[in-house]
Image (cartoon, grey):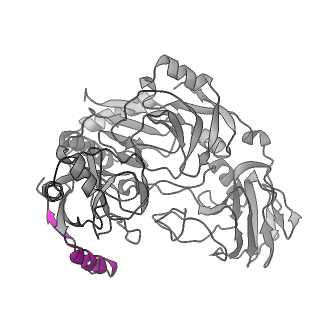
Amino acid sequence: MIRVLNAGFFTTIQDKGRVGFAKFGIPISGVMDSYSADLANHILNNSLDTALLEITFGGCSLQFIKNTMICISGADFSPTVNQMKIPLNTRIFVHNNDVLSFGTRHFGAFCYLAVKGGFLTEIKFNSRSFFQNITDDFMIRKENLLPFLEFHDFKSSHASVKTKKSYFKKTKIKCFKGPEFDLLTKNQQNLLLKNKFTISKDMNRTGFHLVEILENNLSQILTSAVLPGTVQLTPSGKLIVLMRDCQVTGGYPRILQLTEKSINIFSQKITGDTFVFSILKL
Amino acid sequence: MHQLQFKLFGEKAILIEWFPEISMSVLNGILDFQSKIVTNNYPFLETIIGYNSLTILYSQKIVNYENEVEILKNIYKSDFQIPNKSNYFWEIPVCYDAEFGLDLKEISIKNHLSIDKIVTIHSETIYTVFFIGFLPGFLYLAGLNPQLFMDRKPNPRLKIDKGSVGIGGKQTGIYPLNSPGGWNIIGKTPLLFFDSENEIPCFATTKDQIKFIPINIKEFYEIQESVANRSYHMIKKQSND
């Protein structure tokens, strides 16, 4: 079990989310950066759908009430155990009463804490991913207790994986044409693919709004499916990159669709970061 | 078949579009395709219905798109008869009292209708559920009388209570959860349209029909209480299409 001493800015339990419930309007949800989350689970030999803690921008502090093995991947928020710096992407043994804290942000937006065997919070519609009105709460709070099974086999090796920091610096976001891409004029298509775009302050697990405006007179579409990674264009020209908690349907034209890899890379960007869209040939 | 359009939607989804209109024939086409996919044991992860679209999600990247479209076309052509799923006709109690109908007065002025007339028109119509989206449990309903069309509010409210019944443009709907929103609110139902404690969290489904039954404020609170202690029995009838 973990006791939450400080919940940080926005910390949630996530796994691979809910599939098969679109008919009820239930979003997919799940880890924002599945590449980093998979890495953490993989290093602990957990199955890749194991629930872990997703920590946004750090600021959180957790006390272990059981022995276990952990791994932290994704963003670097200077993690420490009992104030001793610990490496990312490495198996770390923690003991009863140890305190894991996150400090200064070096890079990235979402960091993953995996524990051996995973967190055993409530399952709703086949997933432990937090979501408002579906799970009991939509974020962890001070004094919450997060259950997991005790793990004692400290003979395991100190496995670790080297990762490339360049993952967090990529500025080319690969995507496919969205279903309504061809409704854009040639000029609008050029602007979309040549211009640099900036992530605005309006960013969360549902979607990232961009600063730049793409003027258009596209009409709205009859409400149809949207997916994580769909780029919507509103009548006022705002571009919204939908992320994991996005709703299942929408009425704005869908002009681009990020690749799965690009969703992961994109999720680690923060307000003010710039990037370009790069279209892949089908 | 000629009217169907297939589009690759990212690496792991195919979007199938019908003629862009809101109609029962389009909805029936979508549902027909959806059940043929299921009965043919076609491998997919999830399907998402829109007004004129069916999106198929896959667990793996699509390797050969053209081939996949061919398979789908053949499935759609197959005349496998699926047993007709029974649909229901639901009576939804709604209190149109001024306490809940925050925008009744404004609609009354703008659309030159008395409040009583708005309530009558809204509650005499039979609406069809097309699909659920936007929020968990939010029903996309077709059938709103054009006399009640009303643009969304320029400044959305920060919080609309769950159960609120509203009009947004050419649509009417019920907020299943507390949410910000720009629809014009005309009443409130004490029923739950999304109940995460229930394995089937939404009682209504695609092609069901809905009729709003006006109730007074006393009845609203009585029903609300019986919903809370789970003793309320929904009024439903077999729907005959």
Which range is magenta? B216-241
When asked about the image quadrant of residue A170, the answer is: top right
Q: Does the segment drawn in magenta span residue B238?
A: yes
Q: In front here: B12 or A186? A: A186
Looking at the picture, does residue B5 appear above or below residue B55?
above
* The furthest residue to the front: B109
Q: Position of residue A99 (x, y in %)?
A: 80, 72
Would residue B83 be seen by someone viewing this image from the given angle? no
Residue visible at 46% across and 54% down in the picture: A27
Q: Does the segment drawn in magenta span residue A169?
A: no
Q: Position of residue B32 (x, y in %)?
A: 24, 44
Looking at the picture, does residue A229 appear above or below residue B231?
above
When asked about the image quadrant of residue B24, the answer is: top left
Q: Position of residue B70 (x, y in %)?
A: 35, 30
Q: Going by the image, does B114 lie left or right of A215?
A: left
* The furthest residue to the right: A84
